[in-house]
């Protein structure tokens, strides 16, 4: 039985909902005053964030932190819970991470795989990239989830029964063509990205990982269209904070053809996420400058300013660490490295992460507290 729509966004066939190709028609997407205002605001904040990233003296510091933050948040939306400290500790511990932590690490790998294909191999966003990202994301979950493959069976997501498996190659090919259409034709790129996200989630092409890959696509498309140079952005914070509305807006596209409501919500997410990322970058930058100035002026570091500054810089990259790592960074002796960390402990910048006598780990709490 066919459903009725205020605007048709697709059709039901044997109980499955098959979305129409993008962009919406009959009628076309209406760029009302609210959407135009939000589009302007989101574009300004995207530009400000991109400019902030370009001016950073150490962009890797922020990229690494923001990628980890997005990995945690996008996973939390799917009920995968771990902590930033657990993710960071895995890099230095030889202990096998928990399943939840491994899934977050998989997201980071997934993003890097996709970016490498885009930047190094100069590939457009395509099924090849999407499938490679999915394979990295689902690695270790088992062959039953078909990592790197579109699903081979029907699924149900709440009230939605997504398209049958036989339709997925065609629908994803249509979506790929839409993503790579000339950006000068039709709708602004930022709005196209919002439409792409809802279309991907409606197609639901995988057995698992659809939400995380769908949100990953937002970041990839921003970078691919030169709206951002690097993934210094975590939209999942807004989606998580407003999760009820997030799913309602996505669902209203299918039920009512309400693309306008979804796009307004999406543009708010982009705008507010950029503001949050910019503000956090400024706070971290200010903290970094303040700590460096303290090292230069503190008598405890008089004979080792340069070494202490080298250590401080390294802690922003690896805020969970051991003394051996500090020795490798500085090329200095164990005693010198331990002396610097002891001063950082006295200042309250660093705390002990565990109480072991051997293989003791430390935490750069002054920085981690800002990220968490």
Image (spheres, rainbow, N blue to C red):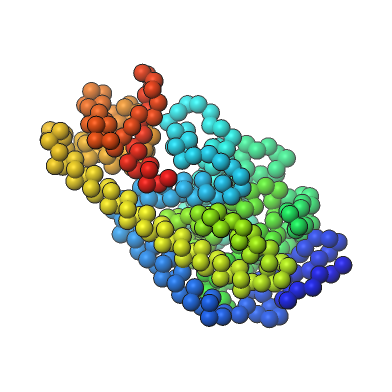
Residue drawn at point x = 55 percent, y = 50 percent: 74
Q: Is residue 173 above or below residue 104?
A: below
- Which of these two is toward me, 174 or 360? 360
The quarter holding residue 27 reads bottom right
Q: Determine the residue positioned at 71% across, 71% down.
A: 256
Task: Please determine whether, in this image, residue 224 is positioned above or below residue 294.
Answer: below
Question: As rendered, which of 88 and 333 lies closer to the eye?
Answer: 88
Residue furthest to the top: 357
Which image quarter is the N terminus in? Answer: bottom right
The picture places residue 85, in percent across and down from the top left corner, at 44, 37
- Nearest the viewer among 7 and 188 is 7
Residue 345 visible in image:
yes
Determine whether, in the image, residue 196 is placed left or right of residue 280: right
Residue 22's x, y, as percent? 66, 71
Res 328 seen here: no
Horizontal side of residue 81 vs 365, given as left or right: right
Based on the displayed image, in which of its 4 quarters is residue 8 positioned? bottom right
Q: Nearer the viewer, residue 22 or 349?
A: 349
Q: Residue at x 61, y 71 (%)?
A: 261
Q: Is residue 218 above or below residue 132?
A: below
Q: Residue at x 65, y 62 (%)?
A: 248
Where's the C terminus, which quadrant?
Answer: top left
- How many marks on residues? 0
Image position, residue 328 (x, y; %): 30, 30
Please state if 340 lies on the left or on the right of 269 as rendered: left
Task: Give percent across and percent down for residue 37.
Answer: 48, 77
Quarter where residue 306 is shown: top left
């Amino acid at each position: 039985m066919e459903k009725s729509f205020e605007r048709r966004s697709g059709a039901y066939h044997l109980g499955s909902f098959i979305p129409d190709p993008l962009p919406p028609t009959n009628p076309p997407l209406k760029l009302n005053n609210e959407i135009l205002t939000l589009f302007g605001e989101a574009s300004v904040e995207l530009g400000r964030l991109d400019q902030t990233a370009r001016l950073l003296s150490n962009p890797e510091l922020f990229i690494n932190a923001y990628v980890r933050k997005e990995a945690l948040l996008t996973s939390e939306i799917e009920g995968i819970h771990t902590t930033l400290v657990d993710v960071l500790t895995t890099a230095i511990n030889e202990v096998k991470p928990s399943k939840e932590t491994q899934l977050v690490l998989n997201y980071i790998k997934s993003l890097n795989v996709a970016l490498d294909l885009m930047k190094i191999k100069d590939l457009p966003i395509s099924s090849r990239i999407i499938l490679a990202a999915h394979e990295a994301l689902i690695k270790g979950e088992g062959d039953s989830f078909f990592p790197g493959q579109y699903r081979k069976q029907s699924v149900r997501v709440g009230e939605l029964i997504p398209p049958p498996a036989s339709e997925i190659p065609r629908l994803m090919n249509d979506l790929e063509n839409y993503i790579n259409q000339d950006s000068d034709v039709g709708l602004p790129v930022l709005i196209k990205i919002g439409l792409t996200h809802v279309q991907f989630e409606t197609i639901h092409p995988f057995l698992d990982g659809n939400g995380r890959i769908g949100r990953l696509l937002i970041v990839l498309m921003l970078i691919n269209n030169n709206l951002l140079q690097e993934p210094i952005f975590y939209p999942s914070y807004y989606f998580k904070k407003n999760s009820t509305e997030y799913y309602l807006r996505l669902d209203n596209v299918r039920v009512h053809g309400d693309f306008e409501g979804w796009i307004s919500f999406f543009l708010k997410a982009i705008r507010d996420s950029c503001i949050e990322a910019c503000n956090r970058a400024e706070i971290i930058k200010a903290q970094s400058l303040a700590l460096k100035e303290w090292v230069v002026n503190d008598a405890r570091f008089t004979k080792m300013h340069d070494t202490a500054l080298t250590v401080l810089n390294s802690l922003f990259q690896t805020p969970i660490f051991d003394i051996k790592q500090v020795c490798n960074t500085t090329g200095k002796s164990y005693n010198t490295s331990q002396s610097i960390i002891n001063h950082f402990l006295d200042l309250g910048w660093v705390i002990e992460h565990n109480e072991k006598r051997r293989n003791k780990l430390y935490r750069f709490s002054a920085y981690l507290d800002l990220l968490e």
